[in-house]
Structures are given as C-alpha cells and as structure tokens.
Image (cartoon, helix red, strand yellow):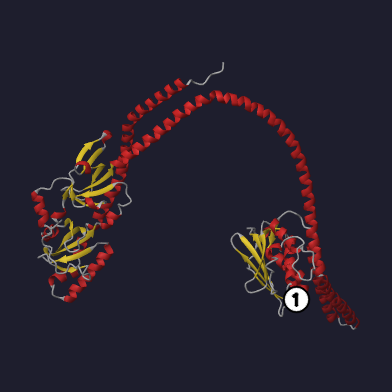
Amino acid sequence: MTSRPLAPARRHAFALTALLVLALGCLAALPRIEERLSRQAEQDNTVTLGLVVQAVDQLVRRFDPIPELVAERPDLRSALADPQNRTQILYANERLRLAARATGASDIYLMDLTGTTIATSNYRRDDSFLGRNFSYRPYFRQAARGRAAFFHALGTTSGQRGLFFSAPVLDGIDVIGVVAVKVTVDGIEDSWSHLSGGVAVADGNGLIFMASRPDWIFTSLTPLSDGLRAEIAETRQVPLSRLAYLNPTISPLSGGVVQIALGDGDAAEGFLVSSEPVALPGWHAIVLKPLAPLQTRALEILASWAAAALALVLLLTLLLQRIARRRELERLAQQDLERLEIRVQERTAELKREVDDRKRAENQLRETQQHLVQAGKLAALGKMSAALSHEINQPLAAIKSYAANAAAYLDRDRPGEARENVLRISQMTNRVSRISTHLLNFARRPGDNLGPVEVGRALTHALELMAPEFRTHDIAVDVTKPDEPLWTLGGEVRLEQVLVNILTNAVSAMPDADRPRIGITVGATQDALTIAIRDQGPGLDPDAADKLFEPFFSARPDGRGLGLGLSISYNIIQDFGGDLTARTHPDGGAEFTIHLKRARIAQEAAPA
C-alpha cells in the first residue's frame, strides 16, 4: 500500500499543536535552567572564595610576626634611648628600609611612647613618616601597653589603604617604643582581577575594606551605629564622607543558594553570594556573581533549545511533504542509473584504451630522457677529451721515461735508483687508473633508484674530472664547504653530471676574463642543502633567463652545443626532489644554485 502525504489542513494542525507544546515546554524549562546555572555559579564562587581566603590568610601569616622580629633589633633600642643622635637615627632609618625591602612591606617605622615617628623606612620620600605622630591609631595604643596589635585604615599621610601590624619595643620588661609594619592592599586586589565574579573582604563591623570593584570600597553591609562612626572618626580610620551603606536585601533561592540585592529600587543589582571567614578576627571574604548574566544565559539556552525544537518541527513538516515526491524521484533515478551504467561501461572501455596508449608513450619518453642524459654526459666528455688526453698522456710519458731510467740503473748495478723509478712508475699508474675510474663511473648509465649521496664526494669527483679543463684555461677554483659530511637522496653519478655541466658552462663563459675564477659554496640548513657555482663571466642575458632550462636553447653567441646540458641538469635535480636556479650575481658573473633536500644518514650508510 502506497502512503500519501498529509493533507494541508492536517499539516497545519500538526504544526500548531507542535508550537503550542513547544511554548509550554519553554515556560516549564526556564526555572530549571536558572537553577542549574545558579548551582554552577555557586560552585565557581566556592573555588574563587577559596583562593581569596588563601591569599588573605597568607598575607596575615606572612606579616604578623615581622613587627616583633624587627622590635628585637638593638639599634632600634639605641635610637629610642638617644633620639637626638643623628648618626644613630640615620642608621636606624637605613636598617628599616632594608628590612621593608626584604620582607615586601610597604613601610616599617619606629615610634616613641608619645606616638612620634623617630625612624622610618620611607625616610627618603617626600611623604616620609618622620616626625609624624600616630598616637591616635589603635595599633599604637595597644602596642604601647605591651601587646601586639592589628589595624586597618586609610593612610593619613600616603592616602593608601593598608593593614598595620605593630609590636612593642622592650628594654627588659619596660615598653620604650612601638614598631609598626604597613602593608598596602593594592597588590592583593590586583591578583583578584582574573577571578570569576566580584570579590570583597569585610571587617567585623561589615565595612568592606578590600574589593575588586572600587565602588564597593568603604561601603558597609550593615548600618553603622553612631558610636562606631565616632570611633572611626577618632582613630581616623576612614573619612566619614566616604562611608556608604549598600542596603543589601538577602533572599534564599532553591538548592541552598543565597541571592543578595545591593542598592535601592530599579538601581539594585542582584548577585549570588558566598562568604567564608579569614584569619583576621570577625573578617569575612565575600564572592558575588552577578545574576543578570546568568539570567541572560538562561534565556539564551532556552532560545537555542526552542530554535532547535522549532527547526525539528519544520523539518518533520517538510519531510512529510516530500515522502511522495521522493518515491517518484527514486523511480526516475533508477531509470537514469540504468542508462548511466551503460554509458559507464562504454566509457570504461575507451579509457582503458587511452591508458594503454599513455603508458606506452610514457615508457618511450622515459627511454628518450635516459638517452638524452647519457648523450649529455658523453657530450661533456667529448668537450673535455683534449684536456683528458693530455692528462693521461703526461703520466704515460713519465712512465716511459722512468722505465728507461730504471733499466739503465739496473745495467749499472744501481738498484736503489732503479727502485725509486719503479715507485714513481707505480704512482703514475695510480694517477692514470684514478682518471680512468672517474671516466668510467661518469660515462656509465646510472640506475633510476635514489640512494644516499655524500655531496662533498660527488663534488670532489666532478672537480677531478674538470681539473684538466681548469689547468688548460688557467682557471682558479675556490671551494667553501662545511667540514662535516652532507648527505642527500639522489644518484651520485647523475649529481656529478649536473656539476660537470654547470662547471663546463662556467669555463665557456670566461674566454676573455683576465683572471678567470670559479667560486663554489656548499651551504646547509637543518632540512636543505645548496651548492652555488659562480663564474666571473658577463652574467646572464635578461631576455634569455626565462628560457635557460628549456631543451635545445643555447645562449652561447657562437651557437655551439645542442642546448641540452642545463635542461638535462634541471630534470635530474627535479628527480631528486630539489630545484636548480640561475641568476646574475650582484657583483658580476652568472651563479647557478642547486637546491637539495638534506638526508639524516649516518656515515656507515654511505655506499662503498
């Protein structure tokens, strides 16, 4: 039985019902999404709160014992005993400065029993505490009674908020002065900038003394009584004009999460709040995460879910509409597929014939290229034949002469001189054998496989083959290369052929040079090798530079040569996975550069 697509009225009813269900689902899901985000935010607050409490506790533990340690210094007792001794006071100032720098304190200062500062670590600054009286501060009063004390306030001299730790200076059991250590809170507040949510630290009276938001500083979470305000004014802890009440409204949310609203009316801000006590008595660290971003995030999640559900409804509607259309298309596609299979079979037979023809053409081209490479090597040997003949004839003539001399010495019963001539004959024979070996290696047809090649050895063989040409034309050769062996993957004989071709061109480019010279530089990086060969000729013709590596192109003015040497060399280097470039050197002459890939092959891997 063939199913039919839904009628338009049924499709519309289905769509409206799905939309209604979607709207009701969104209304039911929003509170759950907000609750989940609130729990996640509460977990983030707990992590942040632990970091804040740890930072404050470490600060208190670090600086709490410092005043008592400093108060034990005998130079401070000497300064208190004779405050008119300028040398003693200067020495005490410097010792306090060094102590402040060593401990990281903002200021360390010494007061007599009247509260007047007689020595301080900031004696060099314009806002120095010297001569200033701090008898109104609680930390001085308690220390003067013989007890270590702590206080927090806005500095009346520096204008910076700080934590003050104090201890009495004792002479035996008598209190003769007070040492105070001030630590500014700017550094610890800066460390909160990367934490999630707002951070505040409030004292036992609910006064926020440290916060990540500047507008929270010197605000209070509880109303300040008149007595507390009078005490703040008397100790000059904070200017009363800077105090403000945040008027918080606290309300619990589901799952034990607490919400707090700061401010009045429409300007109130909502936060998820978490708090934990710190090492200071009555103090609490508070982390507040704004509710507005959470509510926005909840709406975004709900909107994404609603969009996905709406897209699903639309997709289902379209799917129902296309069921019948799809079946018709399947029938038509089956007919097209049958026709296509017939055409594919016909085309496959044609492609098979084309592939066979292409393989035959490639084999013919490969054989032709190999013949051209071999012809290029033989052509290079032909160009060097006169010089090589002279190079071989020289030791042959010497061998003949040494042999005649050896026979004459033997006839005269002089075996020592005859032996010396025989040794020279052996040396000349080795020389002829070495030249013949290089010629045979160079002339033989190389294999197609790539293997490890030591670049320095290939260059040495090529220079030995070209040595007669260099001597014939009185050409000097400068070679610069690293001492270490440099390896590449290629064919040693074919690399020698490329070098001989380029060196032959360099010789031909300097017929009129006063002091013909060829410079060869071998360079290496971590992954690449270069062989640069530069002559002292006129350089490259700019019009011919683009055609330099084309077959049968020759830039020689006399028209000699087939124009295959550089083309063959270029293809050989390409087979090695490298490149061959040419340019006119800025200082004159043509420079050919062979670029090769560097191979990390141990010396033992080199072929014999």
Element type at mark 1: loop
Please say whether residue 476 is visible from this viewpoint. yes
In the image, residue 561 lies at what x, y percent?
A: 79, 66
Specify the amino acid type for callout 1: Pro
Q: Residues within 10 Å of mark 1 (few under 14, many from 20)?
A: few
Q: Nearer the viewer, residue 153 or 397?
A: 153
Query: Which of 184 and 335 lies nearest the eye of the viewer?
Result: 335
Q: Is residue 514 left or right of residue 419?
A: left
Q: Is residue 122 above or below residue 57?
A: below
Could you tell me which residue is drawn at 30 percent across and 40 percent down?
42
| Front residue (pair 441, 155) | 155
- Of the 4 image quadrants, the one containing the N terminus is top right
Percent of width and height locating residue 94: 23, 71
Quadrant location of the C terminus in the rendered image: bottom right
- Name the residue rendered at 22%, 68% in the picture: 122
Residue 380, percent from left and from top: 79, 66
Give the residue at the far right of this rendering. Answer: 411
Task: Please tell me whether residue 143 is drawn above or below residue 348 in the rendered image.
Answer: below
Going 71% across and 80% down the picture, which residue do you hit?
A: 514
Rendered position, 422 above or below 605: below
Query: Can residue 439 be seen?
Result: no
Residue 336 vertical placement versus 275 (above, below): above
User: Residue most toward the front?
Assistant: 8
Q: Is residue 252 left or right of residue 36?
A: left
Q: Which residue is mark 1?
A: 511
Residue 291, image x, y percentages: 28, 41
Q: Nearer the viewer, residue 1 or 398?
A: 1
- For this orientation, the residue located farthest to the bottom is 412
